[in-house]
Image (tube, rainbow, N blue to C red):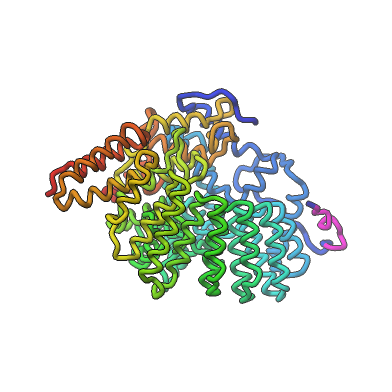
C-alpha cells in the first residue's frame, strides 16, 4: 500500500491531522506503522471538518485496503459516495478488488448490498458471487448475499443449474443444499406432488452416490416437511445403507419410533436395537444422544 | 510469538492471565492498531476470561470503566474504540463489561436503552447493527441480551423480535443470520439465547436442534460450526451454550472436548488458538475457557450460557435463570 500522498503538503497542506487518542492511561511511545497512523490522523481531521471530497474518498480507499474491517471508515465512504454522486458502478469494482483478499469481511458485503440496491442493477452480481464461491464454496456471506439478490431482484432461473454444478463438485457442500431448499421452496404456490417427488428422487440419488453425508439427509427431511408425506415410505430406501451410513440408521430409528408409538412392538424392539448399536459401535462419540433416544422409545407411553 | 509445539492436559490459568494482561502492551505492532475498531470487544473477551479464571483484578477496574465510558456516544451507543462509530455489538460489550465490574451506573443507561430500541425495524422486528442498516440475528441477540441485562425489555416490541428470529429457523432445526440463510452454530447461539431471554424456547424443536448441535462434534473431539467444516475452539462456546440452554449438554463427549480445547493452548506465551498449532488470540481464549466452564472444568467459575457472563454477575443483577426447558 502507498499512503505517501498524505505527506504531500500540496494535497493536505490545509488539514491539521489529529493524532490517535489512546483513551485513558496511554502508554508511550507508539511505533506502529507510520503510513497507517498518518492516514488515520488525516481521516480523523477530515471527519471532524465533515469534508466529503474526492481526496477524502481516496483516503478511505487506502485505509480500507489496509484495514477492511474499519467499519467507521466504510460508513464515511458511503456518505461521500452519495454526497458526491459518485459513479457507483466503479464502486462495485473497488469492492470486487477487495473481496479477493477479504472474502469474509462483513462490511464489504453490506456495503455492496447498499450500493447495488441504490443502483437497482443486479447484472454483475451473480458473476461476482460465483467468483467468490469459486474460491470457497461455503462462504457464508456470499450465500446470504446471493439470497438477497435472488429475492430482491426476483432472480431465480440460474440457481438450480448452479447448485447442480456445485453438488457435482462436492456433494457434501451443506451451503449448496441449504440454498437448494431456499430456491426450490421460495414460491409456495409452485409446490406440488411432482416437485416433491422429483426432489426426493434427486436427493436419494445423491445419497446413494456418497454415503455418510448428512446434508442431503437433512434436505430430505426438509422436503418431506413441505409435503403431507410420511417418513415411513423411506424405510426400504434407508435399508439400502444399513450398517454403513449412520444417517440411514438414525432415520430408521425415527421410522420405527413412529410405528412403536402406534403399538407396533416389533418396531419398538428394532428401534432400540439400532440405538444400541449406534451408541456402542457406530457413533460412540454421541453415545449419550442415542441412549436418550433409546430411553424415550423404551419408556412406556403415557 | 510462535505457538508452542508442546501440549498440556491442564488449563494453564496463570499463563493465560499473563497473556491477557500483555495484550494492551503490544502498542508497537501494526496488528494492535488494525484491530483498534474492536478494542472494546477485546476488553470484554479478556475480562470475562479473567473473571471465569478467578482473576478479574488482573485488569485495573478504574481503567476499564474509564475506557468503556470513553467509547459512549451522545446517542447512547458505544463504539469499538474512541473515535469510531457507535454500533449495537459494542454497546452490548460495554454493558457486559460494566456489569462484570458492577459499575453500570457509571454510564447513562436510559440513553443506551434509547439507542438499542431505535435500531429495531418496526415492520419485521429485526435489529440493525447500526444506523447503516445491516440486518442479522446476531443483532437480535445483542439487543435482547442488552435490554434484558438493563431490565428494559419493555422498550422494544418483543413479539415482533421473536417473529423475526423464527423466520430464520431452518428445516434442519437450526438458525441462520437472515431468513433462508444456512444454519450456523454461532447464529444458533444467538437465536436460542435470544429466545431463552424472552421465555420463548417452546418455539424450538429441542430434540432436532440438539441432534444437529451434537452432530458438530468430530472424531478428534473438537466441534465445527456447520457440517463438513473444520473444528474450531470458539464453537466450544457457540455449540455448547445452545446445548446447555436446551438442557442437552451431556450429548457432547466431554472428555474428548476437554482434550481438544486444552491441546489448542499456547504453552509458552499463553492464550488459546482456534485449533492446535495455530496462533492464540483473546477471542478463542475466552470461548475456550467459557466452554470448559460450561462443562464444569475444575477451578473455573460457572458461566451463564445465555448471557455469556460469569453466573455470579447474573445472580448479582437479580436476573432469573430463564433457560431451563
Q: Is residue B131 above or below residue A302?
A: below
Is B188 positioned to the left or the right of A229 in the image? right
Towards the viewer: A286 or B117 = A286
The answer to which quarter of the image holds residue B132 is bottom right
Whether residue A71 is visible to the viewer of this picture, yes or no, is: yes
Q: Quadrant of residue A288?
A: top left
Q: Nearer the viewer, residue A33 or A167?
A: A167
Q: Is A230 left or right of A26, judged from the image as shown?
A: left
- Is residue A29 depicted above or below A6 in this figure? above
Q: Is residue B251 magenta?
A: no
Residue B284, given in percent of the width and then of the height, sits at 52, 39
Q: Is residue A251 left or right of residue B73?
A: left
Horizontal and vertical percent position of residue A290: 29, 39
Give the image location of residue B110, x and y in percent.
Answer: 42, 62
- Dominant secondary-structure state across the stretch colored magenta: helix
Of residue B219 and residue A44, the one placed in the foreground of this image is B219
Residue A8 included in the magenta stretch of the image: yes
Asked whether residue B83 appears in the rendered view, the answer is no
Compared with A49, B254 (above or below) is above
User: Which residue is at a point 33% across and 39% down the rendered structure image?
Assistant: B251
**How many numbered marks appear?**
0
Identified at 36% across, 36% down, the residue is: A283
Query: Could you tell me which quadrant the N terminus of chain B lies in?
Result: top right
**Magenta stretch?**
A2-11
Where residue A273 appears, as percent x and y from the top left, is: 24, 38
Within the image, what quadrant is residue A159 found in? bottom right
Amino acid at each position: 500500500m502507498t499512503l505517501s500522498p498524505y505527506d504531500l503538503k500540496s494535497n493536505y497542506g490545509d488539514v491539521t491531522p489529529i493524532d490517535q487518542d489512546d483513551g485513558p492511561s496511554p502508554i508511550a511511545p507508539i511505533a506502529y506503522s507510520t503510513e497507517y497512523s498518518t492516514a488515520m490522523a488525516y481521516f480523523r481531521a477530515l471527519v471532524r471538518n465533515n469534508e466529503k471530497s474526492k481526496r477524502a474518498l481516496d483516503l478511505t480507499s487506502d485505509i480500507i485496503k489496509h484495514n477492511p474491517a474499519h467499519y467507521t471508515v466504510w460508513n464515511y465512504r458511503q456518505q461521500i459516495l452519495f454526497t458526491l454522486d459518485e459513479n457507483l458502478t466503479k464502486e462495485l469494482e473497488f469492492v470486487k478488488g477487495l473481496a479477493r483478499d477479504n472474502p469474509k469481511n462483513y462490511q464489504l458485503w453490506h456495503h455492496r448490498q447498499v450500493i447495488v440496491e441504490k443502483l437497482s442493477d443486479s447484472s454483475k452480481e451473480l458473476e461476482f458471487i460465483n467468483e467468490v464461491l469459486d474460491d470457497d464454496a461455503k462462504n457464508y456471506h456470499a450465500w446470504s448475499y446471493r439470497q438477497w439478490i435472488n429475492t430482491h431482484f426476483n432472480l431465480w432461473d440460474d440457481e438450480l443449474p448452479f447448485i447442480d454444478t456445485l453438488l457435482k463438485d462436492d456433494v457434501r457442500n451443506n451451503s449448496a443444499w441449504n440454498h437448494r431448499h431456499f430456491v426450490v421452496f421460495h414460491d409456495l404456490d409452485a409446490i406440488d406432488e411432482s416437485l416433491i417427488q422429483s426432489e426426493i428422487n434427486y436427493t436419494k440419488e445423491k445419497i446413494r452416490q456418497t454415503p455418510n453425508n448428512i446434508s442431503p439427509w437433512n434436505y430430505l427431511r426438509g422436503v418431506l416437511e413441505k409435503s403431507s408425506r410420511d417418513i415411513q415410505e423411506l424405510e426400504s430406501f434407508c435399508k439400502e445403507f444399513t450398517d454403513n451410513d449412520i444417517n440411514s440408521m438414525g432415520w430408521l430409528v425415527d421410522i420405527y419410533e413412529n410405528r412403536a408409538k402406534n403399538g407396533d412392538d416389533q418396531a419398538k424392539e428394532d428401534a432400540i436395537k439400532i440405538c444400541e448399536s449406534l451408541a456402542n459401535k457406530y457413533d460412540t462419540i454421541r453415545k449419550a444422544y442415542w441412549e436418550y433416544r433409546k430411553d424415550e422409545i423404551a419408556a412406556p407411553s403415557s | 510469538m510462535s505457538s508452542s509445539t508442546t501440549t498440556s492436559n491442564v488449563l494453564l490459568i496463570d499463563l493465560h492471565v499473563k497473556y491477557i494482561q500483555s495484550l494492551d502492551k503490544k502498542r508497537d505492532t501494526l496488528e494492535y492498531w488494525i484491530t483498534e475498531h474492536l478494542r472494546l470487544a477485546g476488553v470484554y473477551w479478556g475480562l470475562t476470561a479473567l473473571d471465569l479464571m478467578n482473576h478479574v483484578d488482573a485488569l485495573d477496574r478504574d481503567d476499564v470503566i474509564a475506557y468503556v465510558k470513553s467509547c459512549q456516544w451522545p446517542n447512547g451507543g458505544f463504539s469499538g474504540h474512541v473515535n469510531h462509530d457507535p454500533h449495537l455489538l459494542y454497546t452490548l460489550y460495554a454493558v457486559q463489561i460494566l456489569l462484570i465490574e458492577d459499575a453500570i451506573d457509571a454510564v447513562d443507561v436510559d440513553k443506551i436503552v434509547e439507542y438499542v430500541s431505535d435500531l429495531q425495524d418496526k415492520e419485521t422486528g429485526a435489529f440493525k447493527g447500526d444506523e447503516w442498516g445491516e440486518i442479522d440475528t446476531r443483532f437480535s441477540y445483542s439487543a435482547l441480551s442488552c435490554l434484558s441485562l438493563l431490565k428494559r425489555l419493555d422498550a422494544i416490541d418483543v413479539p415482533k423480535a421473536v417473529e423475526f428470529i423464527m423466520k430464520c429457523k431452518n428445516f434442519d432445526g437450526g438458525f441462520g443470520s437472515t431468513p433462508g440463510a444456512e444454519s450456523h452454530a454461532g447464529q444458533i447461539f444467538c437465536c436460542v439465547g435470544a429466545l431463552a431471554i424472552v421465555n420463548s424456547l417452546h418455539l424450538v424443536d429441542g430434540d432436532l436442534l440438539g441432534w444437529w448441535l451434537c452432530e458438530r462434534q468430530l472424531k478428534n473431539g473438537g466441534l465445527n460450526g456447520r457440517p463438513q467444516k473444520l473444528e474450531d475452539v470458539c464453537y466450544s462456546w457457540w455449540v455448547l451454550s445452545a446445548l446447555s440452554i436446551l438442557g442437552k449438554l451431556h450429548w457432547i463427549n466431554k472428555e474428548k472436548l476437554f482434550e481438544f480445547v486444552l491441546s489448542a493452548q499456547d504453552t509458552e506465551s499463553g492464550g488459546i488458538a482456534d485449533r492446535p498449532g495455530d496462533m492464540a488470540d483473546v477471542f478463542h481464549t475466552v470461548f475456550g475457557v467459557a466452554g470448559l466452564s460450561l462443562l464444569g472444568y475444575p477451578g473455573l467459575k460457572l458461566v451463564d450460557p445465555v448471557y455469556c457472563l460469569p453466573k455470579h454477575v447474573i445472580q448479582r443483577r437479580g436476573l432469573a435463570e430463564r433457560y431451563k426447558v
